[in-house]
Amino acid sequence: MDAFSGIKGFMDLFPPDSTAFTRLEEAARRIFASYGYDELRTPLVEYTDLFTRSIGAETDVVQKEMFTFPDRRSRLMTLRPEATAGVVRAYVESKRYTREAVSRLFTTGPMFRYERPQKGRSRQFHQLNCECLGSHEPYADAEMIGMLVHFLGAAGITDFDVLLNSLGCGTCRPGYKSALAEFFRGLDLAALCEDCRRRLHTNPLRLLDCKVPGCRALTENAPLLDDFACAECAGHFSTVRRLLDAAGVCYILSPRLVRGLDYYVRTTFEVVSGNIGSQSAVAGGGRYDGLVAQLGGPDVPGIGFACGMERLALLLPEREATAPDFYVAVLDEAALDTGFLLAQQLRRAGFSGETAYAARSAKSHLRQAAKNHAAWACILGSNELAQNSVLLKNMVSGEQRSLPLAPLADLERAMQKGSYEH
């Protein structure tokens, strides 16, 4: 029988990759909790309409990237391509807005998009998401961006830039879109990439952040939203910037930053790094004040961000793997039960390590202990079994000493000190 192979774009994560994800999740839970965020777990599958209504039917995600399939009743289901829509759906369905003025929620887990796999991008990828629902205030925006920067620093990531922009609102954006459309009518549209020719009729804002060099050159002199922002949007963005400046959060104004989902308004931001190849964005988000109402809830504002864990993992500083404290080497089959119980007792005392499942020679066991980078080898043979003792060997210095098995106090003290007292 032929061996099975994994699906292209769906990765298996062994250490050190899985360890990097664990480190990111641990840092996220610690930092997000310090800002009052609760963890929410949402399903991997939602009705397709949830994403077409929230993300936008004409976005690249909906048009080209979703994994969609019918269930047995011919209802269209989609593997979630992003988290915000599912979080908002859960928020509305649970009527959480009736219990608290502001909801702060974070999620973590896999997302799915049918894209060409490359470094930092898979068809199943993983995200950390934060959503703050219930506040119109620019203080929520500044705190959200500050929390993202705080989390990245806590995870050990320092080489990045924060890009910042405002996308306006329903009052000022229509005038800006009209000005963009007028500007684009004067261009050689044949020189645009295929995606931008489509976006020209569906969402002209997206032409501004196209990464194709020819499109960027053609739109270099396009009008900027700053010139069309209403007084309320201008004031909101000014306050966000003032708060970030006061908090010492560095950012770069990026008037071409649009983001790829239709629900964003006002503050939008992105974290980028030049150290992970062509896909430089590692996190991003923005405000989505109309989304809750659009999905059947009350008119509750919101702001959030998502971090791509595969890309963040590429920026983590290299760290040595944590070495186990012990390896129990059993030389005689009669000592297997004793070795098993010794390992259990040591773990309950706070040590980490492995035990052999079969009796083998001392040389074989010590080779395995060295391969595991264990600090100590606890050797059990027929002599030790007869004397109710264990031979403790320091795997660095080579020192060894016989210690009683019961009580374990002497053995524990020796392992904690890292060397023997003479």
Image (cartoon, rainbow, N blue to C red):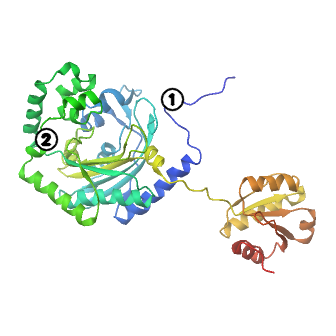
Quadrant including the N terminus: top right
The residue tagged 1 is 8
- Does residue 171 show up? no
In the rendered view, does 391 fall on the left or right side of 414?
A: right
Viewer-nearest of discs 1 and 2: 2
Residue 229: % across, % down: 9, 47
Identify residue type, mark 2.
Leu
Front residue of this view, candidates 281 and 287: 281
What percent of the width, then of the height, locates residue 336? 84, 58
For residue 211, above or below residue 252: above
The residue that appears at 18% across and 21% down in the rendered structure is 189
Residues at marks 1 and 2, CA–CA distance in whole angstroms: 40 Å
Q: Left or right: where does residue 116 sit relative to residue 378?
A: left
Question: Who comes first in sequence, dot 1 or dot 2?
Answer: 1
Image coordinates of residue 18 in percent, x first then y, are: 55, 48
Question: Label 1 sits on what residue type?
Answer: Lys
Picture quarter containing residue 356?
A: bottom right
Residue located beneath label 2 in the image: 224
Q: Nearer the viewer, residue 14 or 225?
A: 225
Residue name at image x 75 percent, y 77 percent: 409
Label 2: which secondary element: loop
